[in-house]
Structure formats: structure tokens, C-alpha cells
């Protein structure tokens, strides 16, 4: 099968289009990644070419050795993804020692955030079935990083109390990292530390880095976070006293009802 006929490719195209409709992808904003399953690799490997150079990865990822990663190409404008779409994605093969990659299909160079994606996908596979990451720049979540204290607890609690279903959609909470230069190794390291505990990490002044079992579920998590952030921003923007909220007891009860346990942060 051709890659452009595969489910994973078409799912990525669809969700990127939804992300654009949400206003999350200005200019070249956003990137995604998916660790391909063996059956996915086998189904499209006729499209691979193994002629391009190996490129070293600034932080080796032994957990990802020999894996194939479907990702977006650097500089891709998501808003224009349909135009020559096959040049806006690429598939990278990771070397046997996890120290380098080569592009075996698609655009010439993977996303500038490749290192963060690889390190985080490596952590995720140790503790979950999550093998997809969706990164976007949603305005309300970013706005919250200017006004809330910079810690996981403050963000998790602010989002849980802003929309009832957050208590089970991300019962573990969300991680928060401070400012880092986009595409930097420091950002990749900080993110991969937080992703050991949380399925989503908020990048201060920048965006959301959400994971899931599929691109669709990673997108869904980013969407739930952004919706709750939008409600929180609207509530704060009224300037009115907050008379009502979803109490911690109500959040716990919601999580428990759906088979989850709300993370309890220590003060
Ligand atoms: O790829 O969003 O974080 C552009 C970005 C970098
Ligand atoms: Zn970004």
C-alpha cells in the first residue's frame, strides 16, 4: 500500500485540518508524531527508500531503537497541508543504537521538535499504549500560562474545575514546563520528564504537547485542555467574583464514576 492510502496518514491529515479550524496552527506552528506498529510499517514499506544520510540525534533514544516514526516535516504550514501533503510529512527510521535517524519517506527534514517527540514517545511506551503526540498553539491555554502559578498542581486544578469531564479525561493532571526556546534540547528534556507522569504537557507561552493511543486521541486531549482553558479565561475575564465551582469532591466523584482516580497533589 502507498503511504498516502494508509489510515495513519489520512487520520493525521484530518486532525491537522481540524486543528487549523480551531486556529491552533499559525504559520508553521505545530507538529505531530506517531510510532508506527510493525503491521503499519509492513503495510507501507514498499514506499520506503533507504538512500538518505543518517543524522545524529542530540540526545540518544535507545527506547526507540529500530522504530519507524511518522512525523511532520520542518517548516510545514499546517493550514496548507493539503497542497503536496506528502512533502509535509516524513517517516524516520531510528538506528539500532537509538543515536541517529534517517528519513526513509517524505519531506527532507523532520520537525524541529523531533528530539522532544522521540524522547517523549520513548517514555510513553514504558508506561502506556500511547504512541502518538499532537503539538499545537491554542491561545487560551497559552494565555493561562501568563496568569497561573507555574506548577502542575495549579494548572491541573484550574482545568479540572473548569469543565466537568476533565476529571476523567486527564485524571492524572497536566504537566507544566517553564519557558524554553522552541525546538531546544532543554525543552525536549523537560517535556520527556513530565510525560513520565502526565499524558499532556503545557509549554509556557507556547502551546500544548498531548499524547494518545492515536493521533485522534492525542488531538482530543489537547482539545479538552484548550476548552477548559477557554472557560477559565472567560471566567477570569469577567472580573466578577467566582461564586460557584466544581468542588474537589465532585471532581473525585466524577473520576471514580468512570473508573479513574483523581491525582492528589501534595502541597
Ligand atoms: O514546528 O510549533 O514548536 C513549529 C513549532 C515548534
Ligand atoms: Zn510549537
Image: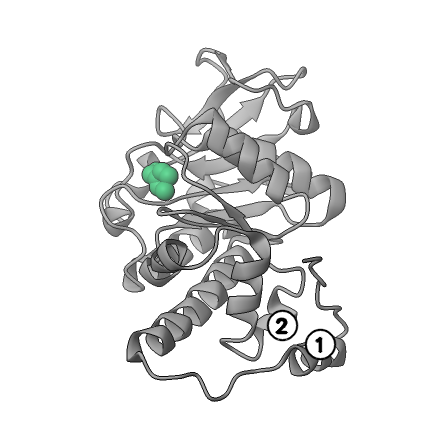
Q: Label for residue 252?
A: 1
What sort of colour scheme is used for the picture?
one colour
Query: In the picture, residue 44 is in which quadrant?
Result: top right
Q: Quadrant of the C terminus?
A: bottom right
**Residue that protrudes farthest toward the bottom in the picture:** 243
Residue located at (75% from left, 68% from top): 261
- Establish if 245 lies above or below 26: below
Q: Earlier in the sequence, mark 2 or mark 1?
A: 2
CA gap, disc 2 and disc 1: 7 Å
Q: Label for residue 167?
A: 2
Few, some or many residues within 10 Å of mark 1 (<14, 14–19, 20+):
some
Relative image position of residue 218 (x, y in whole percent): 53, 55
Few, some or many residues within 10 Å of mark 2 (<14, 14–19, 20+):
many
Query: In the picture, residue 93 is in which quadrant?
Result: top right
Relative image position of residue 143 (x, y in whole percent): 34, 58
- Establish if 213 lies above or below 240: above
Disc 1, SS = helix
* Depth check, front residue: 199 or 147: 147
Disc 2, SS = helix
* Depth check, front residue: 67 or 125: 125
Q: Is mark 1 within 8 Å of ligand 2?
A: no
Amino acid at each position: 500500500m502507498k503511504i498516502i492510502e494508509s489510515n495513519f496518514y489520512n487520520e493525521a491529515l484530518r486532525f491537522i485540518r481540524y486543528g487549523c479550524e480551531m486556529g491552533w496552527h499559525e504559520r508553521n506552528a505545530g507538529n505531530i508524531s506517531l510510532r508506527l506498529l510493525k503491521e503499519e510499517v509492513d503495510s507501507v514499506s514498499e514506499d520506503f527508500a533507504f538512500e538518505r544520510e543518517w543524522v545524529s540525534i542530540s540526545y540518544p533514544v535507545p527506547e526507540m531503537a529500530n522504530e519507524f516514526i511518522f512525523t511532520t516535516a520542518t517548516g510545514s504550514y499546517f493550514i496548507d497541508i493539503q497542497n503536496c501533503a506528502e512533502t509535509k510529512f516524513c517517516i524516520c527510521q531510528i538506528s539500532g543504537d537509538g543515536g541517529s535517524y534517517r528519513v526513509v519517506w517524505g519531506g527532507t527534514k523532520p520537525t524541529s521538535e523531533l528530539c522532544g517527540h522521540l524522547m517523549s514517545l520513548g517514555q510513553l511506551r514504558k508506561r502506556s499504549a500511547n504512541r502518538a503526540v499532537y503539538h499545537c498553539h491554542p491561545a487560551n491555554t497559552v494565555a493561562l500560562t501568563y496568569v497561573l502559578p507555574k506548577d502542575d498542581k495549579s494548572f491541573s486544578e484550574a482545568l479540572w474545575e473548569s469543565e466537568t469531564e476533565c476529571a476523567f479525561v486527564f485524571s492524572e493532571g497536566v504537566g507544566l514546563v517553564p519557558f524554553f526556546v522552541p525546538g531546544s534540547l532543554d525543552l525536549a528534556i523537560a517535556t520527556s520528564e513530565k510525560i513520565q507522569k502526565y499524558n499532556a504537557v503545557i509549554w509556557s507561552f507556547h502551546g500544548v504537547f498531548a499524547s494518545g493511543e492515536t493521533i485522534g486521541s492525542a488531538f482530543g486531549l489537547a482539545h479538552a485542555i484548550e476548552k477548559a482553558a477557554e472557560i477559565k479565561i472567560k471566567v477570569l475575564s469577567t472580573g466578577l467574583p467566582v461564586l460557584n465551582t466544581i468542588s474537589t469532591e465532585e471532581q473525585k466523584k466524577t473520576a471514580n464514576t468512570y473508573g479513574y482516580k483523581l491525582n492528589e497533589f501534595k502541597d
